[in-house]
């Protein structure tokens, strides 16, 4: 695995790969890698002949400067983890100048699905995500890119963007990877104290209880309210707990197949998100 730090070196590599008829698989990340990221890498088995993982903590998708500063980072550990997989060809870890050169002033604007869920309390977040993901698609010239369903809204927005902008890349969705107690893997979990990590178990538990109640025919609004209260009682600040269509992300009053529960809740200053499908 080669560590590449500049856009120019990356361009030389991917241009040669395309000449040689290789297909390029991309896993874009912000580092602090865990088993969830490695699953994204493995899901490209048989779908790409070359694999690039990118690590870039993208400042323009953080609406809170403290959150950006505190985002966990550790390139050496990430590099070692990826090298161990034996299947990653390039780790692209650019600094800010390679991504946002002086004078940078062009952004992708997402409308509609960015105003709800995480877009509601993180204004500009999805514009920042759409912009960096497009730049990474262009820089890596990826044919296929893997995204986790844990960030389901992000996945929907990227799929929509690929259609809207005719981007020549296939999006591969990958189911959420969970700890033994069902907490969704996330780089942010590293910031939880031991006590918060215990508390965090209530998040997937509340979603599972909520799903069970909805499947048993309990009314949607009252069930969501009860689960929200359970999370508050467990010490969470709840940003949202919604039942929404998987396709449009519109709120659903009926617990039908094709709907999904979405939650964002914080423990202290650590914001956790999760989602689970009804069917
Ligand atoms: O999901 C993430 O880690 C980030 O939002 C992404 C897609 C790498 C863009 O910075």
Image (cartoon, rainbow, N blue to C red):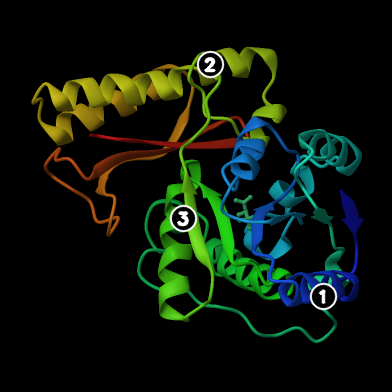
- Given residues 161 and 224, the one toward you in this image is 161
| x and y, in percent, of residue 19 in the image | 75, 77
User: Is 245 rendered above or below residue 134?
Assistant: above
Q: CA distance from mark 1 to mark 3?
A: 26 Å
Q: Residue furthest front?
A: 20
At a point 53% along the width and 16% down the height, the residue shown is 199
Residue 102 placement: quadrant: bottom right
| x and y, in percent, of residue 272 in the image | 53, 35
Q: Which residue is mark 1?
A: 11
| x and y, in percent, of residue 148 in the image | 52, 45
Q: CA distance from mark 1 to mark 2?
A: 45 Å
**Label 2: which secondary element:** helix
At a point 65% along the width and 44% down the height, the residue shown is 41
Question: Could you tell me if the residues under marks 3 and 2 are in contact, i.e. CB atoms within 8 Å?
Answer: no
Sequence-first tag of 1 and 2? 1
116 left or right of 31 in image: left
At a point 46% along the width and 55% down the height, the residue shown is 155
37 left or right of 4 in image: left
| x and y, in percent, of residue 48 in the image | 62, 56
Per the rendering, the mark at residue 199 is: 2
Mark 1 crowdedness (10 Å alpha carbons): few <14, some 14-19, many ≥20: some
User: Is 59 rendered above or below residue 78?
Assistant: below
User: Where on the image, by quarter, is ligand 1?
Assistant: bottom right
Per the rendering, the mark at residue 155 is: 3
Name the image quarter holding the C terminus: top left
Sequence-first tag of 3 and 2? 3
Mark 3 crowdedness (10 Å alpha carbons): few <14, some 14-19, many ≥20: some
Q: Nearer the viewer, mark 1 or mark 3?
A: 1
């Amino acid at each position: 695995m080669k560590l590449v730090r500049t856009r120019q070196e990356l361009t030389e590599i991917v241009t040669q790969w395309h000449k040689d008829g290789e297909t390029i698989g991309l896993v874009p990340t912000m580092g602090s890698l865990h088993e969830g990221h490695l699953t994204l890498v493995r899901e490209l088995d048989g779908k790409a002949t070359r694999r690039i993982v990118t690590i870039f903590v993208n400042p323009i998708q953080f609406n809170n400067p403290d959150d950006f500063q505190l985002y966990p980072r550790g390139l050496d550990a990430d590099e070692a983890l990826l090298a161990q997989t034996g299947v990653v060809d390039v780790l692209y870890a650019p600094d800010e100048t390679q991504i946002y050169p002086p004078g940078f002033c062009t952004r992708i604007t997402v409308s509609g699905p960015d105003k709800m869920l995480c877009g509601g309390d993180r204004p500009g977040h999805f514009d920042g995500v759409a912009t960096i993901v497009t730049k990474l698609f262009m820089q890596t010239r990826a044919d296929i890119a893997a995204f986790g369903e844990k960030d389901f809204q992000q996945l929907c927005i990227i799929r929509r963007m690929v259609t809207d902008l005719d981007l020549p890349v296939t999006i591969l969705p990958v189911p959420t990877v969970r700890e033994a107690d069902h907490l969704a893997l996330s780089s942010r979990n590293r910031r939880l104290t031991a006590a918060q990590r215990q508390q965090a178990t209530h998040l997937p538990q509340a979603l599972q209880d909520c799903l069970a109640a909805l499947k048993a025919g309990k009314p949607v609004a009252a069930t969501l309210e009860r689960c929200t209260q359970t999370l508050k009682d467990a010490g969470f600040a709840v940003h949202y707990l919604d039942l929404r269509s998987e396709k449009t992300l519109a709120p659903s009053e009926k617990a039908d197949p094709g709907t999904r529960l979405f939650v964002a809740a914080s423990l202290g200053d650590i914001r956790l998100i999760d989602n689970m499908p009804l069917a």
